[in-house]
Amino acid sequence: MYSKKFERFILGVCTRCLTSAVNGTTTSARTAVSWTSVRKHHKQFLERRSQNGFAVVRIRHASKTTVDPNEVKRFRLLATKWWNEQGDFAALHSMNDLRVPFIRDNLLNAHGGRQPGKPLAGLRILDVGCGGGLLTEPLGRLGADVLGIDPVADSIGTAEVHAWHDPDLRGNVRYRAITLEELSEKGGKGAGQFDAVVASEVVEHLADLETFTLCCNQVLKPGGSLFITTINKTQLSYALAIVAAEEVLRIVPSGTHDWDKFVSPVDLERLLESNGFHVESIRGMLYNPLSRAWSWTETTSINYALHAVKLEEEPNPDEDDPEDPTVIVAQAKARRWYN
Amino acid sequence: FPMVWDACSDALITFDKENLQDEMAYIVENNIIVAALTKQLENLSDQVRVQYKSKVVKYTWPKSHQVADAIPWVQVTLANGQILQTKLLIGADGPNSMVRREAGIPTVTWNYDQSAVVAVLHLSEPTENNVAWQRFLPTGPIAMLPLSDTESSLVWSTSHRHAEELLQLDEESFVDSINTAFWSNENHSELVETAGSLFRTALSVLMPSAGSARQLPPSVAGIGPKSRIMFPLGMGHASEYIRHRVALIGDAAHRVHPLAGQGANLGFGDVACLTQLLSQAAFNGKDLGAMQHLLEYETERQRHNLPMMAAIDLMKRLYSTNAAPMVVLRTFGLQATNTLPAMKAQIMAFASK
């Protein structure tokens, strides 16, 4: 009932304001207690999995190219809270109502429906910065073969444990604690594998966007899709996404976002277009903290979603190396010029 | 179409449509519905498994969010020792729902001190049986719902004692009491009759064309063998229809008096709503037991069900008395409603939903 929802919201706001003062000591104590049991369970789970003949997850250190070490630290502290739908990540949970249909429908347009009940069956998707797997799991349920990667090993642990309980996900959802650069640099293995790359609420946490774009290009099949959701760099986004969301309403834990790292859709589009992508659509998103729901909106001044497609490559009979990204980009530019 | 009238006066109300091409409602015997559903289930046997003759002995609920060693789904323990796990448990186990009780969902209930006697009636002569009849006696409403040209279904709500007596009667006496209940005028008082006919005259001056001709209910000759049973009546409403990974539908969520014939329909409405929300959630790749769409189900159905339940309860109380002032009031109300086509259209639209 509406009154109940409103009640819950007000209660939530008041509780958060009151506990923010006490946050320092109690939070860490709480997380320590629940974290040990999760780690124990995760260890048992890994042992069980290796017994069953699966490859054991190798945990690597995050490379420093696109990943900001402070961000890693911040997200590690939040690792166990991912799956509390009313908790710190509530806004991300409800964002699925927009981003899952956005990804699903754009992929269906490109690839057609394959199986009733599993609209994304047969597609390989990479979820970059998957965190606890909030977006990875729905995509897996829709039939896709999803690999979720995140530099924060603790988040990957949480994601694996959560997905393991669901038989619908065991076959086609996998996680690795690895960065995008590491995945894309593994010779031929990482390259050109995925039908789609999803980077949702990720680019605003990165150190180097250009490298990120090149790596996305590297791992995508030609004609593959790139989906990005992120926050615009405007005064309005400062007021709403930083001041309101983090400090006042506590929709997002304080310090999650750094306004300097926000990128406007124009800049992002320019970056993508000069790195072998064609931007198909950009749509604005808006969060209503009262109803805790997202909706599509006309303006991209705060949050937005972007869909880009990797340009098709043509086989090159010249002596130029066809795998060289600069050649591909030059060809793409040339093609566009002639068209 | 339904015809409803008061035992204590001559007021009556009929719901019909000028153009009787579209039916207002369908009455289908429960056995037929169950048979049709069973047949459909057999067609879906690779997706739906029905386990007959099983009883649940225990439910184990999940914690609200991820706790390391616990399984995050609902566990159902059966009498034969089998344990099932599910992402979403739907409680469709009737007014004394065990699911609701074990989930600790607070329920508002009260008993009506009435029981309903139901039976299959054989009519005296075959007729175009497309009218549902309901007469409000001081002891409770008696209703005859058409099943075929020769048979109707009886729902007679009355006191516990009277209901037991009715069950004890031999077939002939039982049939006589039914016919008397529909036809006799012993409850009319002079005051009410006079008031009623004056009001009717006034209305016919104001709205001469409205109101319909009075039809007569069919008389009963016999009853179907072994079809006479009784069950107690009450009102019940669960304050929450949902919990994490649990949803209540039908009588488990709400229980009403049969006088409006809406109890099963409210349940069907629950099913339609929940099915639609679950399929939307599935198309968005959601975990079916997640609270978000379950809350939407609860809100939508409570908004629809509560007004209906309140109206039915009000009607029941209103018609449970022969005190003259109440009778006059409801007589006027019924007659006035009968002559207002707009209001009748609204009532029909709501009941047909």
Image: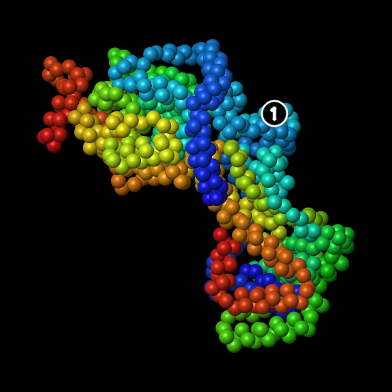
Horizontally, residue A31 falls left or right of residue B192, namely: left
Determine the image quadrant of residue A289: top left
Q: Considering depth in this image, is A52 or B125 the residue closer to the camera?
A: A52
The picture places residue B117, in percent across and down from the top left corner, at 79, 59
Pointer 1 chain: B
Is B166 drawn above or below residue A7 in the view shown? below
Type of amino acid at the residue the image marks with label 1:
Gln
Return the x and y of residue A230 as percentages of the image width and height: 33, 35
Which coloring applies here?
A: rainbow
Q: Quadrant of the C terminus of chain A?
A: top left
**In front of the other: A272 or B86:** A272
What x and y, as percent, mark residue B266? 62, 55
- Vertical relation: A309 (above or below) A3: above
Q: Which residue is mark 1?
A: B82
Residue A118 point in image, percent of width and height: 45, 35
Residue B340 as seen in the image, left or right of residue B285: right
Residue B344 or A257: which is nearer the viewer? A257
